[in-house]
């Protein structure tokens, strides 16, 4: 019975109701700290400070201009898949599932004018430019016989590069190394750096990312695909296929996305971090067949 001990009789015991309030307050304090350490998914740390040396707005604008030019040229060559092409619809469907989960990684992604296009080229290539401009080459779908989960692995990886602003980071490091940045003007996208951004679009397609950038894109990519309901372990199968394709002439995609056994092991080591996300994610309502052979330059207008 409460109050029977000597301390209670002397008034030194904390009343039960007060003890309960203190416990509840302590639990609330612990819960408030939970997001800092209990986030479910991968952890890749903060973005590089070098990205802050380049204007995000101008880099995204440069990427958008380069992308629009590429699509115009592809259309003129009848190599731009029309909206109704089954594989173009496939890419856009997968993107629609992935993109909503990108906002947590980059607030700017909410305002990006996302675009997804399919180019009728046999190259093994895909990319996502700053600002959410996505393109897949038909060859990477066809030659690797990619299933939807593997397509999601590529798309998640490429989108992750844009979200983590790796191109902006690379260019910031290059500019800093070359000594073209003036304090203040660079942060505002002015001066020598700002004037040079107009010609950056072409560099975005050939930019080499660091091993750290690639690792980040791998990990963020498997989280994006898991949240979107695609099997994150498909990333392992994808890179195994890429390594097999690399036994001959290296695919163009590998010139900027080097494959190795190390990255496969890194992905495998992190799959457990996204397993719960995938287990709870709604599965895609649509599944698409693998890409049939690219028969000619006009295949983009065929089924």
Image (cartoon, rainbow, N blue to C red):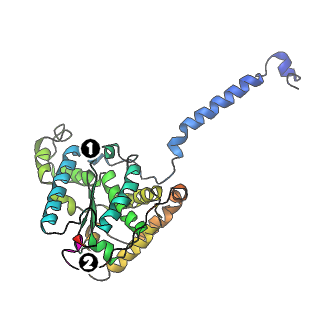
Is residue 113 shown in magenta?
no
Marks 1 and 2, the one that precedes in the sequence: 1
**Which picture quadrant has residue 276?**
bottom right
Vertical placement of residue 230 versus 31, above or below: below
The residue stretch that appears in magenta? 294-300
From this viewpoint, is residue 124 visible? no
Give whichever of 298, 230 is nearer the camera: 298
**Which picture quadrant has residue 107?**
top left
Give whichever of 61, 35 is nearer the camera: 61
Q: Which mark is residue 68?
A: none
Mark 1: give few (<14), some (14-19) or many (20+) Cα within 10 Å.
some
From this viewpoint, is residue 264 visible? yes
Q: Is residue 183 rendered to the left or right of residue 151? A: left
Residue 5 image offset from top left, x and y in percent: 87, 24
Please give the name of the residue rendered at 22% of the width and 70% of the height, measured from the top-left corner: 301
Residue 169 image offset from top left, x and y in percent: 27, 51
Q: Is residue 19 rendered to the left or right of residue 300? A: right
Query: Residue extending furthest top?
Result: 10
Residue 60 image offset from top left, x and y in percent: 22, 49
Residue at the spot of label 2: 294
Kindly state the secondary structure of the residue where label 2 is placed. loop
Task: Quadrant for the N terminus, please.
Answer: top right
Give whichever of 136, 238 is nearer the camera: 136
**Which one is in front in this view, the residue at disc 1 or the one at disc 2?**
2
Vertical placement of residue 29 versus 49, above or below: above
Distance from disc 1 to disc 2, alpha carbons, whole Å, reads 42 Å
Vertical placement of residue 7 versus 246, above or below: above
Residue at the spot of label 1: 52
Query: Residue extending furthest bottom?
Result: 248
């Amino acid at each position: 019975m409460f109050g029977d001990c000597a301390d209670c009789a002397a008034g030194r015991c904390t009343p039960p109701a007060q003890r309960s309030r203190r416990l509840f307050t302590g639990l609330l304090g612990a819960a408030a700290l939970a997001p800092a350490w209990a986030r479910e998914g991968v952890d890749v740390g903060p973005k590089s400070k070098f990205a802050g040396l380049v204007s995000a707005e101008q880099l995204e604008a440069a990427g958008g201009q380069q992308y629009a030019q590429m699509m115009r040229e592809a259309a003129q060559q009848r190599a731009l898949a029309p909206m109704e092409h089954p594989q173009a619809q496939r890419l856009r469907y997968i993107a629609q599932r992935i993109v909503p989960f990108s906002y947590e990684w980059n607030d700017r992604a909410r305002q990006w004018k996302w675009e997804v296009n399919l180019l009728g080229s046999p190259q093994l290539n895909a990319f996502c430019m700053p600002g959410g401009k996505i393109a897949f080459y038909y060859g990477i779908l066809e030659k690797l016989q990619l299933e939807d989960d593997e397509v999601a692995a590529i798309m998640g990886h490429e989108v992750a590069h844009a979200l983590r602003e790796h191109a902006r980071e690379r260019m910031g490091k290059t500019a800093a190394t070359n000594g073209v940045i003036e304090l203040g003007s660079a942060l505002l996208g002015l001066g020598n750096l700002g004037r040079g951004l107009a010609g950056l679009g072409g560099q975005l397609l050939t930019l080499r990312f660091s091993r750290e950038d690639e690792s980040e894109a791998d990990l963020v990519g498997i989280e994006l695909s898991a949240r979107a309901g695609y099997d994150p372990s498909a990333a392992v199968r994808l890179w195994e296929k890429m390594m097999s394709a690399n036994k001959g002439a290296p695919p163009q995609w590998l010139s900027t996305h080097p494959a190795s056994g190390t990255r496969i092991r890194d992905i495998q080591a992190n799959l457990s971090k996204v397993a719960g996300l995938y287990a709870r994610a709604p599965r895609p309502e649509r599944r698409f067949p693998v890409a049939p052979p690219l028969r000619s330059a006009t295949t983009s207008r065929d089924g």
